[in-house]
Amino acid sequence: MRKFIKYFLVLGLFLSASALAQVETEQESLHKRQIHITGFNAYPPFGEWDTKEKVFTTAFDKFIEKYAKERKFLIIDDFRHPEYKEIVREVRRGNVDMIMGIYYESDTYTGLDYVFPSFVSNPVVVIMLPNRIDEAKGADDLKKLKGAVNTQDQFSDYVNREIAKFNVERVDGAYDTFEKLFKGEVDYVFSGYYFGIVEAAKLGLRKKIAFSKQVIWEIPMFIGLSKVSEKRNFLIGNLRLFIDNNDVKSMLKQSIEEHIRRYEEKYIGVVPPSYSSGVPDADENEDDLKWKPIL
């Protein structure tokens, strides 16, 4: 009888150990299939973190989803800190595997691996009032005028050095930046083309400003990887092949377009700030006011 009981005790311990090992194996397998990603937390359309809904929205959504599906990964949005520089540090420390949309040779991203080639660019343009947009034919014309930059706009170090060569005032936030433009305190605003459209739409100013058709600077954007991520070697090779696919490039371009149009539609009917009341809408038809590629 004792041998019989001992047999079942040993069997029970064996089965328990086996079940525990299976759970641990499944957890390890799940961990290996997880990619923790992050990005701009307040720079639409390239990244916006909704603290209330706990949702990360970005023009890279389709890109990320397609990559995860084909490579059988589980994507986890990872925003451990509200400050963007601290978010980047989390990637550098290896707590996050991948960051979307970083700029080459910029101090903020020192210590990260870049996935080449660039998979999209952030064109920088000039925003002016519609009746003045023809005053600036090129950079030499801008140097004769006074400009502004929204400090929430995200530029590469190279572009920031170039902007410093102009008579430019740095202003906190889109509301105050556009106020200076409408009140004539500045003549123009340097802005990321996509970001400028989104911020203008949010304030109901989309029809009251004009964007230069000439791109002042192109900022190539890359995927950044943590050098100490255990998935780094796998990701860097796979992502290079994935990015170099023409269908993927086309999908990403379309995704940016759709993302911006959603912003435009979302903020239709927003009453613009009172400081713009004396400025008539741009003399353009409805189709011209919708987002369109300028490259």
Image (spheres, helix red, strand yellow):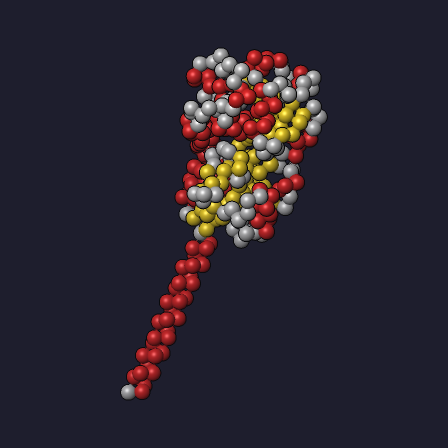
Total marks shown come to 0
The picture quadrant where one finds residue 250 is: top left
Is residue 173 shown to the viewer in this render? yes
At x 34% / y 79%, what residue is drawn?
Answer: 9
Q: Is residue 153 above or below residue 3?
A: above
Q: Is residue 215 above or below residue 160?
A: above
Counting from the top left corner in percent of width and height, residue 48 is at 50, 38
At x 64% / y 43%, what residue is drawn?
Answer: 110
Residue 74 is left or right of residue 196, and the answer is left
Farthest residue toward the front?
A: 274
Farthest residue toward the right?
A: 165
Residues 280 and 254: in front is 280
The picture quadrant where one finds residue 6 is: bottom left
Residue 275 is left or right of residue 247, and the answer is right
At x 63% / y 25%, what residue is drawn?
Answer: 148
Q: Is residue 5 above or below residue 291?
A: below
Is residue 246 shown to the viewer in this render? no
At x 52% / y 44%, what residue is drawn?
Answer: 38
Counting from the top left corner in percent of width and height, residue 75 is at 45, 46
Counting from the top left corner in percent of width and height, residue 199 is at 52, 28
Counting from the top left corner in percent of width and height, residue 238 is at 49, 44
Identify the image quadrant of the N terminus: bottom left
